[in-house]
Image: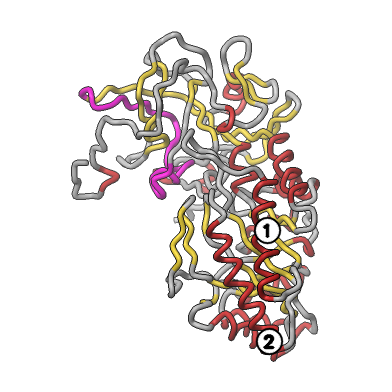
Amino acid sequence: MRAHEAGALHGDIGNRSPAWLRTPVDVNDLVPQLWPRNVARGAGGALAVAGLDVRDLAAEFGTPVYVLDEDDLRSRCREFRAAFPDADVYYAGKAFLCRAVVRMIAEEGLFLDVCSGGELATALSAGMEPARIGFHGNNKSVAELTRAVDAGVGRIIVDSFAEIDRLTALARERGVRPKVLVRVTVGVEAHTHEFIATAHEDQKFGFSLAGGAAAAAAFKILDEDVLELRGLHSHIGSQIFDASGFEVSARRVLALQAQIRDARGVELPELDLGGGFGIAYTTQDDPAAPHELAKRLRKIVDGECAAENLAVPHLSIEPGRAIVGPAVFTLYEVGTVKDVDGIRTYVSVDGGMSDNIRTALYDASYSATMANRVSGAEPMLARVVGKHCESGDIVVKDEFLPADVQPGDLVAVPGTGAYCRSMASNYNHVPRPPVVAVRDGRARLIVRRETEDDLLALDVG
């Protein structure tokens, strides 16, 4: 790698593809685990989702556009519910939230996790039953807590002593008894299938287990007897493929459950193990099915409860990415194709880091395919990049596309349902793309495209 004064993202990365990326036999083939379940190539060679040709979607809604396979999302909700029949499955709204998705997950029997006043407002405006909402956040304001209490939010996950004091004061003032969980930082840091156990938890979320803050928070709530402490909450990270991190986390948080029982004579009835279950972005990813996750997590919890002589608590989990991530792809139009001195070929599309910041922010990997046609050309190693004034504006770092890709072609990137639209920005004053839900051969707009008028309406100068 050649160093660059502005950082690694700005430097030349070289012309070698990653070891896991293989040259395809047929560059037109789709890898099934990367795509929404109702995506296939139609008779004319173009991608179709739930029977709709992506060329028609592009003509009607423009590009870039996030395309949601609604039946795919709903089926993933049902699979998690079936896998965890005795648990509460909270959809993690931070992955992607809009009123239509709130209604979808509610209709499929899921709960909803929100982590800001805006997400709570979206949930309530869509008609989500407040008792089925969990409210996260490391710095909830008094106004946010007031809204949550007044709405009757089912679980508030407390994250600091200051928050406990704020919520206690609100509860006393209103004569109510909010149900809360204590978020515990258990010293497990998960990175996909790896985890690192540490003695000190260096992050902004939760109460430290090792330092004793988690126990102190639980004792404070119990002793003041204003809030109803229902249980403990643990979240170890995102894009996790290995259950080992959950095993360490469950062991530590259930040991705290036992400590609370021994010290106060109270056996807390609930345990939330969080989410972070991984999905397949490329062929190197091999996520577990929900029923396999459930089997592993249940075995872990049952074993640790037996070891601590605890009754098995009522479980909650919080899948977000695992539900919405695979159900969406982003459709772009190619603007330029540029071979750079034999180093690599850059395929520039009409979106970029404003609609998918994950590649630049997390060094995330994605796949892509030609969407508007099939090609008989040889596979060509390409980099799909955006239109922004930034060298790190990369959508797909390495992918094989047909060597005859040209301006006007459509390129589709799968796995963009989670943390793409929800983290989208207006960098370079580019309006954010719309979200279109497709089901049974029909498309409906669920989040409209931003316009320049939208951008200018906020500029009051």
Q: Residue furthest front?
A: 307
Q: What is the secondary structure assignment of the residue under circle 2?
A: helix
Height in image: 291 above or below 348?
below
- Depth check: give the residue in front, 422 or 157: 157
- Depth check: give the residue in front, 72 or 316: 316
Residue type highlighted by circle 1: Lys
Point out the frontmost of discs 1 and 2: 1
Q: Residue at x 48, y 35 (%)?
A: 282
Task: Decide whether residue 343 is among the magenta residues.
Answer: yes
Residue type highlighted by circle 2: Asp
Per the image, the residue denoted by label 1 is: 299
Magenta segment: 341-364
Q: Residue at x 28, y 26 (%)?
A: 344
Per the image, the residue denoted by label 2 is: 262
Query: If you read the primary sequence from the N terminus, does the residue marked by circle 1 or circle 2 appear first?
Result: 2
The numbered mark at residue 287 is none
Image coords of residue 60 (percent x, y):
62, 24
- Depth check: give the residue in front, 85 or 395: 85
Image coords of residue 249 (percent x, y):
56, 66
Instruction: Locate residue 50: give its quadrant.
Output: top right
Location of the C terminus by quadrant is: bottom left
Q: Residue at x 73, y 73 (%)?
A: 149
Q: What is the secondary structure assignment of the residue under circle 1?
A: helix
Between the residue at mark 1 and the residue at mark 2, the CA separation in whole angstroms equals: 24 Å
